Amino acid sequence: MKLEGRVAIVTGAARGLGRAYALHLARLGADVVVNDIDMQAARVYGEELTANTVPDEIRAQGRRSIGVEADVTDRAQVDAMVERTIAELGRIDILVNNAGGALVPGPSFASSVPEADFRRMMDINFWGTVNCCQAVSGPMKAQRSGKIVTVGSQAGLRSQGAGGTAYSVAKAAIHHYTRKLASELGPHNVNVNCIAPGWILSSRAIAAGRNSPETRARLEAEIALGRLGWPEDCAKVVEFLVTDLSDYVTGQVIPVCGGVCMF
């Protein structure tokens, strides 16, 4: 129970990777605010929950949890979520900025990606992260403690060929924003780090075909450990970054990719 008495906010946590983070932190003793734009999002991708919603799953573990449907690209909604968290749970110790993804369709070539698509991808990923980080920075500075984890991607570390420009640039922006925020909040005893997942078998990725034999064979050839990752592989690294194990780690971007970064 490393996180007994701590309060965490996990965005985009009604399914997939965010759900894995929220449940993992609850198992470590944290009370968890589950944010998503749709608290029933798991149904869209056929992800089976053990209760009606993720907050219900967490409460079944004996932890406090509230669900907040809010769009993290809207700063007013984010501020309201933070205010509600403090009002109902008393404090904020941990923020995991999971909301985001490659949610704008289209090939997104660097020389031709439409401005509207580029801006939307930046809003979903980069600005959603900035809104949440800024909203919790004040309370964390006031209590002189806190752990912030942003979520980047291997796409923000490597070109990966043509296409995917808007998503890659948005994630790269998150990586460097993490470093800048870490340098600012370090004197206030607040750690800020980033994880950069690789090929993870989230429910959305599985629904899109990532778990097919053909796709697995192609992707596994790029990975030193020879397998795709599961959400819990990322959750274990989040555990490191939000507990005392990482008290002297800040401003880092940590790949969670099984060694795809070696290729």
Image (tube, rainbow, N blue to C red):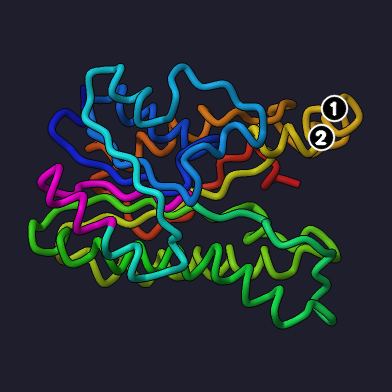
Question: Which segment did they paint magenta?
Answer: 81-98
Q: In this orientation, which residue lies closer to the viewer: 40 or 105?
A: 40
Quadrant in the picture for residue 157: bottom right
Quarter containing the N terminus: top left
Q: Could you tell me if residue 245 is visible in this image?
A: no
From the viewer's perspective, is 137 left or right of 13? left
Which numbered tag is attached to residue 45?
none
In the displayed structure, does residue 160 sit left or right of residue 46? right
Residue holding disc 1: 212
Q: Position of residue 241 (x, y in %)?
A: 34, 42
Location of residue 132 (image quadrant): bottom left
- Identity of the residue furthest to the right in this view: 214
Q: Residue at 45% of width from left, 60% of height from top?
A: 71
Give above or below for 199 relative to 73. above
Disc 1 residue type? Ser
Magenta stretch contains residue 84: yes
The total of numbered circles placed on residues is: 2
Q: CA distance from mark 1 to mark 2?
A: 6 Å
Q: Is residue 229 left or right of residue 114?
A: left
Image mark for residue 209: 2
